[in-house]
Image (tube, grey):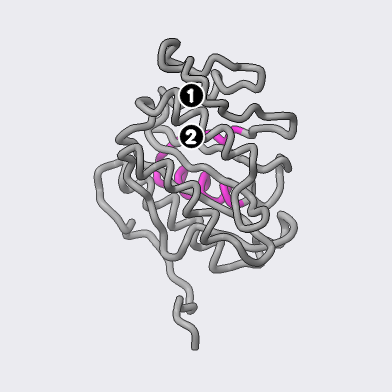
């Protein structure tokens, strides 16, 4: 079993990568392999709605490495797409890749579990999660959740570790993904819960 994780941040080892790494560690502890693919910080082509992928069976533009990601999708059993939050939405590079990937190769992801992970200094996380997850729900993909919404907070990678609830949420997300892939159901019995609550006191 393998989970493909996409880092949609232009910062290779920033907050988004840190969150995905925590998920990866939890997956490994449950015996599930994972791979984090960075989209880079160069230009990423947007989908232009040309429809050529319907005949070719894949996106006809490959100047930014999408074909390699599509090949990895064919071999993956589950997916986690990660993004920083910009003005209450995911990064443009991740959205461009998602649109082209799902338009051209949705069959490679259909029926496989997916999760979204976002990082922000403060706000805009819920709307960003909503945008990413819409790609899953229109493609008949089960959504993997955690003990809180899949988000971490911090301006720098080291700040993420100060977000104890966010770190625990990432760990529980990895465990739940592993449970689903192994057919054990969720939530994973190894999940841990802090003293926090989602209710305002």
Point out residue 57 in the picture as x, y percentages from the top left corner: 42, 14
Q: Which residues are magenta?
A: 19-37
Q: Is residue 154 left or right of residue 79?
A: right
Point out residue 167 in the picture as x, y percentages from the top left corner: 56, 61
Q: Earlier in the sequence, mark 1 or mark 2?
A: 2
Element under label 1?
A: helix
Residue drawn at x 62%, y 65% as measured from the top left = 123
Residue drawn at x 39%, y 42% as measured from the top left = 136
Q: Nearer the viewer, residue 97 or 183?
A: 97
Point out residue 33 in the picture as x, y percentages from the top left corner: 45, 35
Residue drawn at x 29%, y 55% as measured from the top left = 186
Which quadrant: the N terminus?
top left
Residue drawn at x 45%, y 76% as measured from the top left = 198
The answer to which quarter of the image holds residue 137 is: top left
100 to 153, vertically: above or below: above
Q: Is residue 167 left or right of residue 77?
A: right
Point out residue 91 in the picture as x, y percentages from the top left corner: 64, 45
Q: Nearer the viewer, residue 127 or 118?
A: 127
Q: Which residue position is annotated with label 1?
A: 72
Check if residue 70 falls in the magenta segment.
no
Element under label 2?
A: strand
Q: Is residue 4 left or right of residue 163?
A: left
Q: Which residue position is annotated with label 2?
A: 4
């Amino acid at each position: 079993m393998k989970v493909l994780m996409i880092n949609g941040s232009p910062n290779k080892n920033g907050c988004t990568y840190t969150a995905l790494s925590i998920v990866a560690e939890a997956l490994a502890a449950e015996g599930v392999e994972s791979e984090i693919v960075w989209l880079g910080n160069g230009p990423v082509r947007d989908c232009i709605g040309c429809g050529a992928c319907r005949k070719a069976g894949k996106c006809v533009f490959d100047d930014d490495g999408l074909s390699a990601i599509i090949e990895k999708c064919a071999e993956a059993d589950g997916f986690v797409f990660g993004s920083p939050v910009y003005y209450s939405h995911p990064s443009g590079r991740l959205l461009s890749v998602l649109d082209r990937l799902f338009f051209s190769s949705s069959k490679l992801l259909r029926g496989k579990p997916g999760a979204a992970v976002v990082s922000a200094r403060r706000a805009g996380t819920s709307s960003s999660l909503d945008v990413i997850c819409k790609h899953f729900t229109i493609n008949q993909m089960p959504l993997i959740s955690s003990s809180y919404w899949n988000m971490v907070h911090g301006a720098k990678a080291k700040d993420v570790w100060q977000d104890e609830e966010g770190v625990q949420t990432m760990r529980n997300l990895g465990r739940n993904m592993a449970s689903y892939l192994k057919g054990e159901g969720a939530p994973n019995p190894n999940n841990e819960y802090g003293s926090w609550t989602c209710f305002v006191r």
